[in-house]
């Protein structure tokens, strides 16, 4: 995770742009969150179907001995799994924060960009026509599908006169998603592969492989840095198009860059864990509630809170009904919903 | 969120004329779709046979097919199309959010969960379930909507649109994840039944269902049309509406109840045809502009036309298997919606 040095004062004093920042809360989230995340990672690597004590974990990570089964379990299964959870949580959460900031729509979420439905449709085709594809191929196709879905949404929104406006993007996303979901349902019903698909839709970081992490890390890391660089512009944009233009911002450029970052973050995340859309929706709301309206703090805090949510939800998913696994998406909703409802009651401002 | 503006800033009179013209064309299209729909199906009837049968001159078999199978189904298509579209139109108007549709009130999710629970514990093949399911679905959607309203209500400020939407999303997400867990536990045959139901297919096609649905639509649609002026004012924002002497919270609750009644009763008969409620109002807005006096009836007609056409195609395309109507609605509706979205400066 990027270590962000928190700054509370902007160098420039912009009229009618006085973000409420809470330096104490922010540093608590950043430092406490990272500590909690490390704790979660350790727990996650130690707990599981085979109980392994902490010393063994330490040795498996730092003095790996491929002869020992326990070391193998940790190196090949649990470590990639938990690191995948960290990346994906941050990816979905920041993608959601950017979407909500740019569109000023509280319902915006990376699932709306056609990513999840595109990936789902690609998988429905795979299950129906090429049963028995290897896991790696499935990942590849779901990534391609996510890209195609998002490309369709973005392409259609950019055809119109006046270019890509956030409202148009969100509407096009809803329509394309509905279309692709309907097609997937049709294929699933006709070829009777619905339950396989449901399993994928339930989402899970189980089965994350090192090679996936290697592919994902530069993309997600780079996109997170890009999001940080954009954060100040996103804050302006979240005050409204007119305000941003009035402050001399080139809004078209910011939105284009923001959208590309969202696509990279959400696309890589969907390819690894399937459709866990709820993270991108709730985490930004939670973060705004805690740290205020400045995206320079919202983005890093969202990343950490998103990672925390996924790592701990995955831990719970393995412990509740061991050795069977509970679907991760269901658990995240279970943890997230009551909390989200509380926030919805609390939230005073519009976005 | 600003509501999307109409096509042109023409004067009100020209807009009204245009609206009437558009609705006349929609009406003609609906009648055409009606006629075509009566001629399509597994057993071919020529248009002449259909005419003869309608006037009581057909054979017994022909009149059985027409009167007991096709007609009720077509009538139901019209009713749910209009119901869902107007429900969506009201919700988009109240919440001033272009993404609002009956789904955000948890109507589809609640109904789906009830059906899922019933199917998980009882045999689906029994005849009783045919009549129990719509009742359960209605109960589920009503309870969910009430829950969402209660959760987003605050004592001294009532229900703000943003809070309502967020609460709706939260509750619907919770229900969906409960359904995913249940899905993984169902045996394949039951899963197939539930999946078909959720995809939205008009399976309740006999006169009893028409009679059950009719009062809801006949009472609530005119009520919604009657409230058009209030909705125009609500669109101006809370403060302006209060300033103009509209009891905002009371009107909002009434309109919400109307939207829930329309969508809940429609979903009970048709399963999850959710997309109509989202796009029909948008299509209508593109055609007749943002004034609710024209927008509400135009939405109703657009929705009805969409569902009839979709249902007819679903019956005809892969005979003898039927494609769930909800899927066809999305496959026809989405491209047209996207075309409009890319063409018009919104």
Image (cartoon, coloured by chain):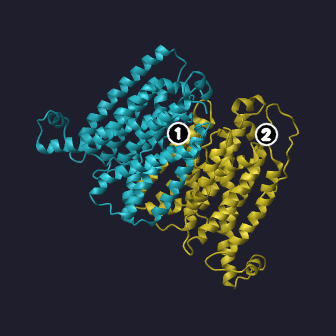
Chain colours: A yellow, B cyan
Question: Disc 2 is attached to a residue of which chain?
Answer: A
In this orientation, which residue lies closer to the viewer: B12 or A261? B12
**Placement of the C terminus of chain B among the 4 image quadrants:** top right
**Placement of the N terminus of chain B among the 4 image quadrants:** top right
Image x and y of residue B285, in percent = 49, 28
Q: Is residue A204 left or right of residue B29?
A: right
In this orientation, which residue lies closer to the viewer: B163 or A249? B163
- Gap between marks 1 and 2 measured at Cα: 29 Å
In this orientation, which residue lies closer to the viewer: B4 or B120? B120
Residue A210, compared with residue B119, is above or below; it is: below
Q: Is residue A292 left or right of residue B119?
A: right
Q: Secondary structure at mark 1?
A: loop
Residue A164, compared with residue B273, is above or below; it is: above
Q: Secondary structure at mark 2?
A: loop
Q: For the point 71% across and 80% down, which residue is it?
A: A53
Q: Which mark is residue B100?
A: 1
In this orientation, which residue lies closer to the viewer: A127 or B247? B247
Image x and y of residue A206, in percent = 60, 68
Q: Is residue A56 left or right of residue A121?
A: right
Q: Which mark is residue A19?
A: 2
Image x and y of residue A91, in percent = 68, 55
Residue A328, compared with residue A226, is above or below; it is: below
Q: Residues within 10 Å of mark 1 (few under 14, many from 20)?
A: many
């Amino acid at each position: 995770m990027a270590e962000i040095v928190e700054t509370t004062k902007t160098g420039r004093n912009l009229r009618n742009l006085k973000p409420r920042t809470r330096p104490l809360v922010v540093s608590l989230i950043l430092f406490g969150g990272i500590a909690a995340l490390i704790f979660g990672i350790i727990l996650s690597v130690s707990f599981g179907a085979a109980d392994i004590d902490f010393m063994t974990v330490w040795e498996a990570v730092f003095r790996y001995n491929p002869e020992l089964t326990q070391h193998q379990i940790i190196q090949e299964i649990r470590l990639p799994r938990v690191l995948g959870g960290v990346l994906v949580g941050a990816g979905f959460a920041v993608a959601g924060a950017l979407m909500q900031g740019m569109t000023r729509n509280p319902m915006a979420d990376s699932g709306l960009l056609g990513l999840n439905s595109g990936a789902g449709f690609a998988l429905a085709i795979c299950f129906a026509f090429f049963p028995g594809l290897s896991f790696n191929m499935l990942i590849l196709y779901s990534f391609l599908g996510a890209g195609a879905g998002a490309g369709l949404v973005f392409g259609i929104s950019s055809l119109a006169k006046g270019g890509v406006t956030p409202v148009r993007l969100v509407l096009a996303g809803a329509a394309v998603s509905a279309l692709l979901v309907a097609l997937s349902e049709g294929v699933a019903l006709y070829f009777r592969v619905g339950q396989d698909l449901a399993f994928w839709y339930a989402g899970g970081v189980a089965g994350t492989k090192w090679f996936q992490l290697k592919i994902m890390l530069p993309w997600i890391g780079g996109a997170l840095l890009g999001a940080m660089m954009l954060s100040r512009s996103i804050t302006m944009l979240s005050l409204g198009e007119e305000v941003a233009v009035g402050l001399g911002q080139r809004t078209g450029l910011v939105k284009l860059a923001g959208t590309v970052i969202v696509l990279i973050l959400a696309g890589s995340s969907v390819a690894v864990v399937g459709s866990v859309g709820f993270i991108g929706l709730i985490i930004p709301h939670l973060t705004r509630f805690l740290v205020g309206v400045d995206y320079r703090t919202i983005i890093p805090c969202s990343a950490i809170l998103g990672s925390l949510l996924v790592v701990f939800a995955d831990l719970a998913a393995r412990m509740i009904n061991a050795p069977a696994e509970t679907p991760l998406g269901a658990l995240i909703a279970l943890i997230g919903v009551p909390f989200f409802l509380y926030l919805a009651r609390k939230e005073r401002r519009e976005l | 969120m600003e509501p999307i503006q109409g096509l042109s800033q023409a004067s009100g009179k020209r807009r009204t004329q245009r609206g009437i013209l558009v609705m006349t064309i929609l009406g003609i299209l609906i009648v055409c779709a009606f006629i075509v729909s009566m001629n399509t199906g597994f057993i071919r009837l020529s248009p002449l046979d259909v005419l003869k049968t309608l006037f009581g001159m057909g054979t017994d078999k022909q009149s059985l097919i027409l009167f007991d199978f096709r007609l009720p189904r077509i009538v139901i298509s019209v009713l749910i199309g209009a119901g869902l579209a107007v429900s969506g139109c009201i919700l988009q108007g109240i919440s001033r959010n272009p993404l609002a549709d009956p789904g955000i009130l948890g109507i589809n999710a609640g109904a789906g969960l009830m059906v899922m629970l019933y199917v998980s514990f009882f045999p689906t093949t029994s005849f009783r379930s045919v009549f129990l399911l719509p009742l359960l679905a209605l109960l589920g959607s009503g309870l969910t909507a009430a829950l969402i309203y209660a959760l987003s209500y605050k004592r001294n400020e009532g229900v703000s649109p943003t809070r309502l939407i967020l609460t709706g999303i939260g509750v619907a997400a919770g229900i969906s994840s409960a359904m995913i867990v249940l899905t993984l536990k169902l045996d394949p045959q039951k899963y197939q039944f539930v999946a078909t139901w959720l995809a939205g297919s008009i399976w309740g096609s006999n006169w009893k269902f028409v009679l059950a649905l009719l009062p809801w639509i006949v009472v609530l649609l005119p009520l919604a049309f009657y409230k058009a002026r209030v909705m125009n004012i609500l669109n101006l924002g809370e403060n302006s509406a209060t300033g103009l002497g509209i009891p905002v919270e009371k009107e909002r609750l009434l309109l919400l109840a109307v939207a829930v009644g329309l969508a809940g009763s429609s979903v009970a008969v048709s399963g999850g045809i959710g997309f109509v409620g989202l796009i029909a109002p948008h299509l209508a807005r593109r055609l007749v502009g943002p004034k609710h006096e024209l927008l509400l009836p135009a939405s109703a007609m657009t929705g009805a036309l969409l569902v009839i056409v979709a249902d007819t195609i679903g019956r005809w395309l892969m005979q003898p298997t039927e494609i769930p109507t909800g899927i066809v609605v999305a496959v026809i509706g989405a491209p047209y919606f996207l075309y409009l979205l890319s063409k018009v400066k919104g």
